[in-house]
Amino acid sequence: MRPLLHPSIEDVRLEAILHALSDPVRVAIFADIAGADCPQRCSAFSSVGDRAIPKSSLSQHFKVLREAGLIRSERQGVEMRNISRCPEIQERFPGLIPAILDAHMAERKTERAG
């Protein structure tokens, strides 16, 4: 198996973070991972909202999040476990992730109400 790319925090670019979180599925996945107390399995995201996500698409979403520096993934047997890198990103870009996650939550509330 190929090793997983995890950029050092110094190599994480604002543009990569914004690109990764511009996709509604990826921002929903990241919000769940960021809000979790423990590593999340990829298979936990086989559906996001009311949409089923094919494995190939899910793999691509995790790759984009990982290569943007938003998550760290580790293989455990046949599973992949993912944790957020929020503390590191907060240090590099203070306030960025909380602002994006707050906006995401506000948008979800609006969608549910409307």
Image (tube, rainbow, N blue to C red):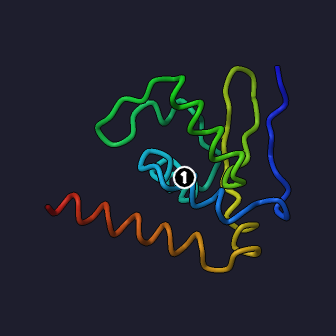
Percent position of residue 91, x then y: 76, 75
| Structural crowding at the residue carrying mark 1, measured as other residues with C-alpha within 10 Å and reported as few (<14), some (14–19) or many (≥20) | many
Type of amino acid at the residue the image marks with label 1:
Phe
Report the quarter where the N terminus lies. top right
Q: How many marks?
A: 1
Which residue is identified by label 1?
30
Percent position of residue 104, x then y: 41, 64
Dividing the picture into quadrants, the one containing residue 114 is bottom left
Residue at figure coordinates x 67%, y 64% from the top left: 86
Percent position of residue 96, x then y: 60, 74
Q: Tell me if 27 is positioned left or right of 113 in this view.
A: right
Q: What element carries label 1?
A: helix
Residue at figure coordinates x 53%, y 59% from the top left: 35
Q: Nearer the viewer, residue 78 or 51?
A: 51
Q: Nearer the viewer, residue 34 or 23?
A: 23
Dividing the picture into quadrants, the one containing residue 56 is top right
Q: Tell me if 48 is positioned left or right of 1 in this view.
A: left
